[in-house]
């Protein structure tokens, strides 16, 4: 080979590898808000979910988990990051929410979390008046596997709502949630899935009917989300170029019935990977939350959540919330980024659709 060409090729290989290693292509964004630290030290905070208030966006909430001690629970924050309510029912690992669950003739907003102290499914409703959580579990809902990750799925066509839990051995259980006739919610096992290794992050696409599950050392799997769907998944993306183990939290940004994004916490390189929600979930790009003037950046992120809706002043264009593994001052906490900052960091920019009503699905 001609020496000049050879040197050129070497240079190309080096610079491409170098680019990847240094993550030159990772967009940088800043947090606009951080919550108060969680109560317990160490790796305690895990997963957030966002509740959009039905009438006044500025009264929306962030619900986060604390898994620090057996007396830990859920932490409820306002949009300034102030903790305004807590539960103390056990080590809460992952939390998720769905709007418009039918209970006793009312439509409630239902929250479920995997509780690792007694290995049960915690079930709450949002009390929008008091901006708090009310336990509505019909009984101690014991799980068949040692719960680790959890998420929810609502089939928007039937209204059937499910809690999905998984464990460190690759097992998945799907429970149908139902009104027990006395104003409380019970759950019955309707499906199991089996993967090869430790699972945790998961998210369902309520409209397209998919369940995405993160196998931490392997990648992101996609299944049909309904109990009768196939138990064979498709590997959407594998740990490697875009994902650095562990694959952690997963969330979906809706910008319409079939458009939007699937977002994953790529914990091993402290970034977030974005894929198309539609079709074969093609990869779009990567971003990280870096140190700002007053709020530190995020790293070792576990859970994430995103909401397209207008949440008032600071978050009128939507919000992206993540757990931060290393808070600069105090225990772990949750950080929030204005969605438009993430959207505009990409070229072409990502969709921004705050008027699309997630609550009405
Ligand atoms: Ca962690
Ligand atoms: Ca994990
Ligand atoms: Ca940090
Ligand atoms: Ca986690
Ligand atoms: Ca901080």
Image (cartoon, rainbow, N blue to C red):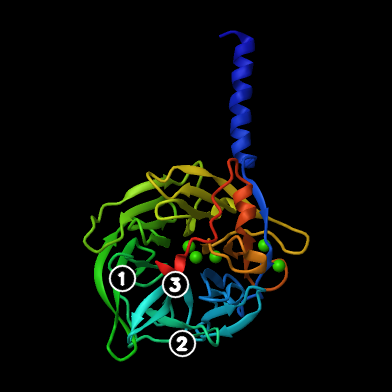
The N terminus: image quadrant: top right
Q: Contact, CB < 8 Å: mark 2 with mark 3?
A: no
User: Which residue is found at the position 34% from the left and 55% from the top?
Assistant: 208
Horizontal relation, residue 352 to residue 275: left or right = right
Looking at the image, is mark 1 or mark 2 earlier in the sequence?
Answer: 2
Which residue is at the front of the view, 259 or 76?
A: 259
At label 3, counting other C-alpha atoms closer than 10 Å, the crowd grade (few under 14, some 14-19, many 20 or more) is many
Taking depth in this image into account, of 99 and 31 the one nearest to the observer is 99
Return the x and y of residue 346 as percentages of the image width and height. Answer: 60, 44
Q: What is the CA distance from the residue labelled 3 to the residue labelled 1?
A: 14 Å
Disc 3, SS: strand
Percent coordinates x, y for residue 207 in the rendering: 36, 59
**Quadrant of residue 143 in the image?**
bottom left
Residue located beneath label 3 in the image: 97
Label 1, secondary structure: give it: loop
Would you name the residue on which mark 2 appears? 134
Could you classify mark 2 by the number of other residues whose Cα lies within 10 Å: few (under 14), some (14-19), or many (20 or more)?
some
Q: Earlier in the sequence, mark 3 or mark 1?
A: 3
Of residue 317 and residue 288, the one placed in the foreground of this image is 317
Instruction: Locate ligand 5 by image quadrant.
Output: bottom right
Extreme residue toward the left, this view: 228
Give the labeled residue for mark 1: 159
Residue 30 visible, this angle? yes
């Amino acid at each position: 080979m001609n020496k000049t060409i050879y040197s050129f090729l070497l240079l190309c290989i080096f610079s491409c590898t170098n680019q990847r290693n240094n993550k030159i292509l990772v967009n940088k964004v800043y947090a606009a808000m951080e919550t108060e630290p969680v109560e317990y030290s160490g790796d305690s905070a895990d997963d957030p979910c966002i509740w959009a208030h039905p009438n006044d966006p500025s009264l929306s909430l962030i619900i986060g988990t604390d898994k620090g001690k057996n007396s830990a629970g859920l932490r409820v924050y306002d949009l300034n990051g102030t903790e305004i309510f807590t539960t103390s029912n056990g080590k809460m690992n992952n939390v998720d929410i769905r709007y418009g669950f039918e209970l006793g003739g009312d439509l409630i907003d239902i929250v479920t979390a995997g509780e690792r102290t007694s290995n049960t499914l915690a079930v709450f409703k949002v009390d929008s008046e008091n901006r708090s959580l009310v336990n509505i579990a019909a009984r101690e809902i014991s799980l068949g596997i040692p719960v680790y990750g959890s998420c929810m799925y609502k089939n928007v066509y039937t209204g059937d709502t499910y809690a999905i839990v998984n464990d460190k051995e690759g097992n998945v259980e799907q429970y149908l949630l139902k009104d027990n006739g006395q104003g409380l919610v019970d759950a019955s096992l309707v499906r199991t899935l089996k993967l090869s290794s430790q699972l945790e992050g998961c998210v369902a696409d309520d409209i397209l009917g998919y369940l995405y599950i993160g196998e931490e050392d392997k990648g992101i799997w996609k299944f049909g989300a309904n109990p009768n769907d196939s138990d064979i998944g498709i590997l959407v993306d594998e740990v490697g170029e875009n994902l650095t183990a562990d694959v952690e939290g997963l969330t979906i940004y809706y910008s319409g019935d079939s458009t939007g994004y699937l977002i994953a916490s790529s914990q091993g390189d402290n970034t977030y990977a974005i894929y198309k929600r539609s079709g074969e979930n093609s990869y779009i790009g990567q971003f990280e939350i870096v140190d700002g003037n007053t709020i530190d950046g995020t790293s070792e992120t576990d859970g994430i959540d995103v909401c397209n809706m207008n949440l008032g002043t600071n978050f009128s264009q939507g919000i992206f919330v993540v757990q931060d593994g290393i808070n600069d001052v105090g225990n772990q906490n949750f950080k929030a980024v204005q969605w438009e900052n993430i959207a505009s960091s990409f070229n072409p920019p990502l969709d921004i659709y705050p008027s699309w009503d997630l609550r009405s699905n």
